[in-house]
């Protein structure tokens, strides 16, 4: 088996969303085909309350799932299906927008650090109009795998060496891991990756090295590495105290038609989504 190499490094684009929340858009729309089934990855990390205090007031979604993973801070979710939950450090919110949902995500703090990620995961065509679903996972719901290398893998979705995350996706076989390297020393860890899966790594503490079959490549902090589809394993070495997320999934290979928070397969479906939202049918 061969080890995947880094195809491309991405620094992300500073932007704002919601009511002026500052964030970095790492997986942008131009990368959707390359990283199918993933549509977007936002990273947010700030100690300045002015960067997040406006939050994300009511807004709609249709046709995909959002996965919000909090590192620090508190964010309150409410939606028009009657769901409400509090995201806190280490917790995850997995929301399936399906045929349509309107929700808000508002900070439940006026100072302190806010840090985390939001991933948009596409739904297959046959599930785009499913009934919306929402689930909060507390930190205690998400298992850690303590690897023999000394690293720890927090398994949010998928299965790492028999440790299964609380979320499992059938068609895309999504893997979402948070990697923690020891505080005392660097170490190396290896992952098995389906040859059909698109995979990326984002480093949010320290730095990593990717040891491919051809070379050793560095992934600096605040950088996403798109992994080539040139192997069935990924071998990475993390410096002491480094942390990163690894996300992988099987491509849907379906057309993507997007208009803001609506992601369908055709332009006609997009028009219908906008009309349904304006008619109050979400």
Image: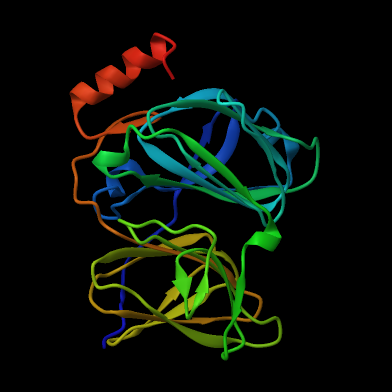
Quarter of the image containing the C terminus? top left
Q: Residue at x 40, y 10 (%)?
A: 278
Quarter of the image containing the N terminus? bottom left
Figure colour scheme: rainbow
Which quarter of the picture shows residue 122?
A: top left
Which quarter of the picture shows residue 215?
A: bottom left
Q: Position of residue 275 (x, y in %)?
A: 32, 13
Q: Residue at x 35, y 15 (%)?
A: 276
Q: Is residue 2 left or right of residue 243?
A: left
Numbered disc total: 0
Rendered position, 60 above or below 227: above
Rendered position, 81 above or below 69: above
Q: Position of residue 15 (x, y in %)?
A: 50, 37
Which quarter of the picture shows residue 110?
A: top right
Furthest toward the top, the residue is: 279
Q: Position of residue 208 (x, y in %)?
A: 50, 76
Q: Is residue 183 left or right of residue 223?
A: right
Q: Residue at x 29, y 47 (%)?
A: 32
Q: Residue at x 38, y 39 (%)?
A: 64
> Considering depth in this image, is 151 or 23 the residue closer to the camera?
151
Q: Position of residue 277 (x, y in %)?
A: 40, 16
Furthest toward the bottom, the residue is: 148
């Amino acid at each position: 088996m061969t080890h995947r190499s880094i195809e491309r490094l991405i620094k992300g684009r500073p932007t704002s969303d919601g009511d002026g929340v500052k964030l970095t858009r790492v997986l942008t729309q131009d990368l959707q085909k390359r990283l199918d089934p993933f549509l977007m990855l936002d990273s947010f990390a700030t100690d300045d309350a002015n960067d997040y205090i406006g939050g994300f007031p009511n807004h709609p979604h249709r046709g995909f799932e959002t996965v919000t993973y909090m590192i620090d801070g508190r964010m309150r979710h409410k939606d028009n299906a009657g769901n409400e939950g509090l995201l806190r450090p280490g917790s995850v919110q997995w929301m399936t927008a399906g045929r349509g949902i309107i929700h808000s995500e508002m900070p439940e703090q006026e100072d302190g650090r806010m840090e985390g990620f939001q991933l948009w995961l596409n739904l297959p065509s046959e599930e785009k109009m499913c009934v919306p679903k929402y689930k909060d996972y507390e930190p205690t719901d998400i298992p850690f795998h303590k690897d023999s290398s000394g690293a720890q893998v927090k398994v949010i979705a998928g299965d790492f060496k028999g440790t299964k995350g609380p979320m499992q996706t059938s068609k895309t076989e999504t893997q979402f891991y948070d990697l923690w390297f020891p505080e005392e020393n660097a170490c190396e860890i290896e992952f098995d990756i389906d040859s059909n899966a698109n995979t990326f790594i984002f480093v949010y503490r320290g730095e990593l090295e990717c040891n491919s079959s051809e070379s050793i490549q560095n992934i600096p902090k605040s950088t996403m590495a798109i992994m080539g589809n040139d192997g069935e394993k990924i071998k990475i070495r993390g410096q002491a105290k480094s942390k990163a997320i690894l996300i992988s999934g099987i491509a849907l290979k379906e057309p993507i038609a997007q208009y803001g928070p609506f992601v369908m397969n055709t332009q006609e479906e997009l028009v219908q989504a906008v009309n349904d939202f304006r008619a109050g049918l979400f």
